[in-house]
Amino acid sequence: MADERHRDREEIDVYYDNPEILDRDQEFNEETAAEIAAPVNVSRDFEEDAAEESTTSGRVLGYSALALSILSLFILPVIMGAAGIVLGFVARRRGAETLGAWAIGIGAVSIIVGLFVLPFF
């Protein structure tokens, strides 16, 4: 019984001794070539995305500042004019130069008219 559990085993190297496997390996041609086209950089630049996002947010702030400044010509000139001027400076800082400048100018005119001209009417 002890002899049945511990048999002497011969190591069999099936791969190198089998002619069918050797023939199949010699017939198999694997493609290992690289692509001819130049590699494309798919990822975008983080700085480019940040600059685009900053310009977009500056534009939104610029339009908001301009709307406040124009609205200040009709109601609450000092308060809304000051808010338009502050938002105009923030918009200029974020890249909306022209919108910010217009908001600052219109807000300043609104404050001047509200303080010095309207009290006489």
Image (cartoon, rainbow, N blue to C red):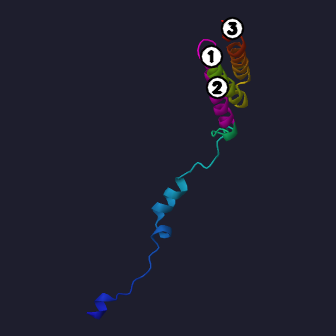
Give the mark nearer the N terminus: 3 vs 2.
Answer: 2
50 or 27, which lies in front? 50
Mark 1 residue element: helix
| Residue 112 placement, left or right of 31 | right
> Which residue appears at 70% of the width and 25% of the height?
96
Instruction: Find numbered disc 3 in the image and state the secondary structure of the residue it sits on.
Output: helix
User: Please, what is the three-letter code of the amino acid marked with disc 3?
Assistant: Phe
Start-end of magenta stretch: 48-76
Q: Residue furthest bottom?
A: 2
Q: Are marks 1 and 2 in contact (CB under 8 Å)?
A: yes
110 is higher (above) or lower (below) than 57: above
Q: Which mark is residue 83?
A: 2
Q: Is residue 25 above or below residue 49?
A: below
Instruction: Assess whether residue 58 is covered by the magenta stretch.
Output: yes
Q: Which mark is residue 120?
A: 3
Q: Quadrant of residue 109?
A: top right
User: Does the magenta segment cover residue 71?
Assistant: yes
Q: Amino acid at mark 2?
A: Ala
Residue position marked by numbered label 1 in the rendering: 72
The kind of residue tagged 1 is: Ser
Indicate whether 20 appears above or below 37.
below
Mark 1 closeness class: few <14, some 14–19, many ≥20 residues within 10 Å = many
| The N terminus - image quarter | bottom left
Q: Is residue 112 left or right of residue 12?
A: right
Most frequent secondary structure within the magenta stretch: helix
Q: Residue at horizontal 72%, vertical 21%?
A: 104
